[in-house]
Each structure stands twice: as structure tokens, then as C-alpha cells.
Image (cartoon, rainbow, N blue to C red):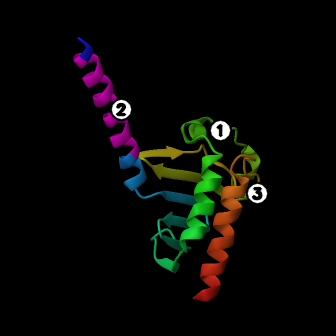
Amino acid sequence: MKYLIIFTLFFGFSKEFHISAQEQDTPLRVYYTASSRGYYYEIALQEPVIKVFHSRDRQVAAEGTLPQDTWMEIRNILSGIELKDLPDINTYIDDSARDKSAIAQLRVCHGGKSYKTPEFDQNKVPKDLKSLINKMKSLAVIVESEE
């Protein structure tokens, strides 16, 4: 009986470790998209690459490789965001502003799962996401200026 308990505990811990290691091996991907009738803007972070798109046909406008310390900074920002709560995050869209401003959305793929926010007004970013989106936008500006 004692050996059965030890075996069960060992097997349970090894399975938990395997899942954690698998999540670590899965590349982090973060997508920020904003669009309206005549406007399209997307930033795609796919470790270690950043891509910027300005058209719906997804022709790459700018592309670059981010250093490891920048990825660590992005991961630190993401660690402060509860990914499973992204679909329920409080967002705001003024119905009269649908044609006036771009509607944005954030999607994070990590650990084999995808988490997506509801749509929000690009000019009214939810406070929980503000630092991440501002970081993504600043990285996109840097990459575009290098092209």
C-alpha cells in the first residue's frame, strides 16, 4: 500500500512537471488588431519575431527580431494579466463611435490555448491591457522606423 501511494504521488508530480515544461516550450504569441472600414493595423508578436501589418491581406509592412530581454519584459507584463479572464475583461465601445474610431482586439496564445478579449475602442484601451498594448505599439514603431 505504501508503495502504491509513493508511486501515485511520483506519477502525479511528473505529469504536472511535464505539463509545465510543455507550456514553457510552446512559443508565446500575442496579436493586437485594430480596424475600421478604411483602416487596418495589426501587430503580431511570435517569439522571437514582431510583424506589423497595415492591410487586411496581411502583407507584412515591417518585420524584425526582438532581443531576449524585450521578450522577458513582455512576459513580465503578461504575468500581471490573468489570461483566462481576458474574454470577460471590461471593455467599452460607444455605438455611435463604431464608424468613427477603430475597433481593437487582443489575442494571446500560450500553453496551447488561445485567449481573446472582447472588442474595444482603440482609443479606450482597458486599463489592465494598457501597458502591454503600449509596449507592443512602441515596439512596432521602432521596427517600422528601421525598415
Instruction: Please tell me which residue lies in front, 145 or 5.
Output: 5
Q: Left or right: 78 with respect to 16?
A: right
Residue 48 picture location, percent across and down: 47, 70
Task: Pick the quarter of the image with the C terminus.
Answer: bottom right
Q: Nearer the viewer, mark 2 or mark 1?
A: 2
Q: Residue at x 72, y 54 (%)?
A: 130
The magenta segment: 3-20
Q: Residue at x 46, y 76 (%)?
A: 59
Based on the picture, tell me whether residue 129 belongs to the magenta stretch: no
Disc 1: CA contacts within 10 A as few (<14), some (14-19) or many (>=20): some
Say which amino acid is labelled 1: Ile
Residue 34 picture location, percent across and down: 62, 60
Say which amino acid is labelled 3: Asn
Residue under pointer 3: 123
Using the numbered discs, state the Cα–Cα distance from disc 2 to disc 1 in whole angstroms: 33 Å
Q: Which mark is residue 13?
A: 2
Query: Visible in this render: residue 34?
Result: no
Residue 136 picture location, percent across and down: 63, 65
Q: Residue at x 47, y 57 (%)?
A: 28
